[in-house]
Image (spheres, grey):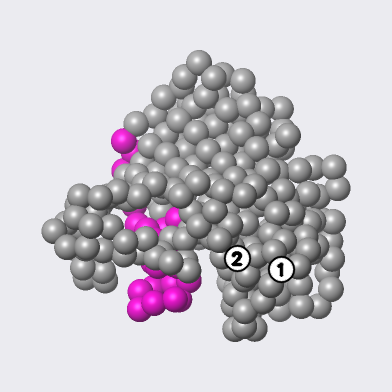
């Protein structure tokens, strides 16, 4: 386990690794023990102050996307976090980061808060936990997501099980829909440009399958999930993505969007996303 001024590298006793940037409190890499890289990180990401890193697991807080008056996805993903602790246990490696309100955040969002991000890696599993405490004297509310970019080799071979029967909002078509069966990313027009918020996912597991590779995603505390892929046309307009980048990733995000989290003074909220390879 090593740390520099801006990146923490976690290595569990069994060889599983994760890399976390203090910029944005952002997970950049996850390699399970004996396995390949599981997260997509754009080779065109700009690691500069004030800009979001494209890929890994950005923290969206206190606003998801442009669903409100704040900058897109809020400010947590573009600010420097501080390292609270890092340790190697008997079976795992863990890092805890913190972001507190500042004059800059209060100018955008007039609330006192403390965020903690915990990243734990062990064997073939990754756990990401986001906690928020209202440290002010007035109630606050927020929407949030762990914007997880999964690396894929062949998007046409990917399916997502566990969403059937859920209502969703299609952010591309600006319309609601009902997921009637498993989500198959077959490359058909209309599926490539994919940006959906699935409501009421709660703790049901999602299974992302690509040929023989499977990733099981579970969440606690988060009520919703987002599935996103920009497709070739939108990807070409993203300066921090290569033109073919859309074909190498799929975002499956633990989120709370439909019903914002409300915290009274002194109250806390915790959300967790766990990824594992069976």
Q: Which residue is mark 2?
A: 198
Please report whichever mark, 2 or 1, sits nearer to the chain's N-terminal start: 1
Name the residue located 34 percent from the left edge and 38 percent from the top edge.
Answer: 83
- Rendered location of residue 11, percent (x, y): 54, 27
CA distance for labels 2 and 1: 9 Å
Residue at the far front: name it. Answer: 165
- Residue 122 within the segment the image draws in magenta: no
Residue nearest the viewer, comparing 26 with 256:
256
The residue stretch that appears in magenta:
58-84
Name the residue located 61 percent from the left edge and 34 percent from the top edge.
Answer: 125
Give the numbered dot on residue 179: 1
Residue at the far bottom: name it. Answer: 174
Task: Give the prevailing secondary structure in the magenta stretch.
Answer: loop
- Residue 81 within the segment the image draws in magenta: yes
Residue at the far left: name it. Answer: 137
The image quarter containing residue 154 is bottom right
- Rendered location of residue 115, percent (x, y): 32, 49
The answer to whether mark 2 and mark 1 are in CB contact below 8 A is yes
Residue nearest the viewer, comparing 76 with 126:
126
Give the numbered dot on residue 196: none
Element at label 2: strand
Element at label 1: loop
**Compared to 242, does 14 lie above or below?**
above
Name the residue located 78 percent from the left edge and 49 percent from the top edge.
Answer: 209
The image quarter containing residue 71 is bottom left
**Compared to 256, does 8 lie above or below?**
above
Name the residue located 26 percent from the left edge and 71 percent from the top edge.
Answer: 108
Query: Can you see residue 33?
Result: yes
């Amino acid at each position: 386990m090593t740390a520099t001024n801006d990146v923490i590298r976690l290595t569990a006793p069994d060889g599983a690794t994760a890399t976390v940037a203090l910029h944005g409190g952002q997970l950049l890499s996850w390699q399970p023990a004996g396995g390949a890289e599981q997260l997509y990180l754009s080779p065109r990401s700009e690691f500069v102050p004030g800009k979001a890193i494209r890929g890994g697991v950005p923290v969206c807080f206190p606003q998801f996307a442009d669903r409100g008056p704040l900058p897109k996805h809020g400010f947590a993903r573009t600010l420097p976090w501080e390292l609270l602790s890092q340790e190697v246990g008997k079976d795992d490696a863990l890092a805890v980061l913190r972001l507190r309100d500042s004059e800059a955040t209060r100018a955008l969002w007039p609330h006192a808060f403390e965020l903690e991000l915990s990243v734990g890696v062990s064997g073939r599993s990754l756990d990401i936990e986001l906690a928020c405490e209202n440290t002010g004297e007035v109630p606050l509310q927020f929407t949030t997501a762990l914007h997880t970019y999964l690396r894929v080799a062949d998007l046409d071979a990917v399916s997502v099980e566990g969403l059937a029967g859920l209502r969703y909002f299609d952010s591309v078509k600006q319309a609601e829909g009902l997921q009637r069966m498993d989500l198959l990313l077959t490359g058909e027009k209309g599926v490539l440009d994919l940006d959906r918020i699935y409501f009421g996912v709660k703790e049901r597991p999602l299974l992302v399958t690509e040929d023989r590779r499977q990733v099981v995603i579970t969440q606690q505390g988060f009520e919703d999930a987002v599935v996103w892929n920009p497709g070739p046309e939108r990807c070409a307009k993203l300066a921090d993505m290569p033109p073919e980048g859309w074909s190498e990733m799929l975002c499956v995000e633990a989120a709370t969007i439909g019903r914002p989290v409300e915290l009274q003074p002194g109250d806390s909220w915790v959300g967790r996303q766990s990824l594992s390879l069976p």
